[in-house]
Image (cartoon, rainbow, N blue to C red):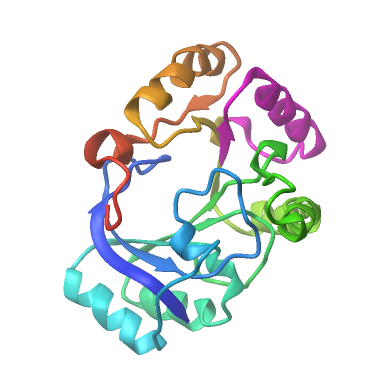
Amino acid sequence: MKVTEIYKSIQGEGFLTGTECVFVRASGCNLRCRFCDTPYASWEPEGQDLSVPEIVAEVDAMRADHVVITGGEPMLFAEMIPLCTDLHRQRIHITIETAGTLYLPVACDLMSISPKLSNSTPEKAPDPKWHLRHERSRHVPDVLEKLIGEFHYQFKFVIDSAADVDEVELYLTQFPAIDRSRVMLMPEGTTTEDLQVTGRWLANYCQQHSLSFCPRRHIEWFGLARGT
């Protein structure tokens, strides 16, 4: 499994915000989001191939009760099945961060699903191939239905404009099985200033429409930095 980094930090997004976790970042992705803030795991994947025992050993050395397996897109890798099984045997809480386009029968305590809206599609220039591929691949209803049917989950949608919120509401009507109390709207941005601009109106919208607002606390705490 190609891994770009393993590190201990504080979860900055979602229901486990503030929890100390070891993060395992898989390198490689089937999508190419316009706003991706980890291009070293997607657009230009870096890292080294590690065996499952090597990954587990690094996690063990960091001594944490929670592991977040992120990317890139970790569900690309078949090694996720034995990796999650081994971590689960040690009673480690496992969060998997995924775009919800791929399925694996993994052991997982929290499936953190971040569906990609139309705002994620990259421009046609300079890479028209990825524009088309991303747009075709970013939404896979059958996979989403399996994930919400089999796992404890949370949804995080990246929001930049009011049009994105309208798209989320339409999305939720298409999947009535999704528990609205588990849906979060998160402002797009990689600086505290950008997050605050969108966050002000987005937090109000969430409060008025029975959704959760999801700040990106790690940006506030550490800035946009690897290993955080």
- Residue 24, quarter of picture: bottom left
Q: What percent of the width, then of the height, locates residue 201? A: 50, 12
Query: With respect to residue 43, does 190 lie above or below?
Result: above
Q: What percent of the width, then of the height, locates residue 209? A: 61, 16
For residue 62, side relative to residue 19 (left or right): left
Q: What percent of the width, then of the height, locates residue 199? A: 45, 20
For residue 92, side relative to residue 153 (left or right): left
Q: Residue at x 72, y 58 (%)?
A: 130
- Residue 155, quarter of picture: top right
Q: Residue at x 55, y 63 (%)?
A: 73
Q: Residue at x 67, y 27 (%)?
A: 164
Residue 164 is inside the magenta segment = yes
Query: With respect to residue 62, does 211 lie above or below?
Result: above
Residue 119 is inside the magenta segment = no
Comparing 135 with 216, the one in front is: 135
Query: With respect to residue 26, does 164 lie above or below?
Result: above
Magenta-tinted stretch: 156-180
Can residue 187 be seen by looking at this rendering? yes
For residue 62, side relative to residue 90 (left or right): left
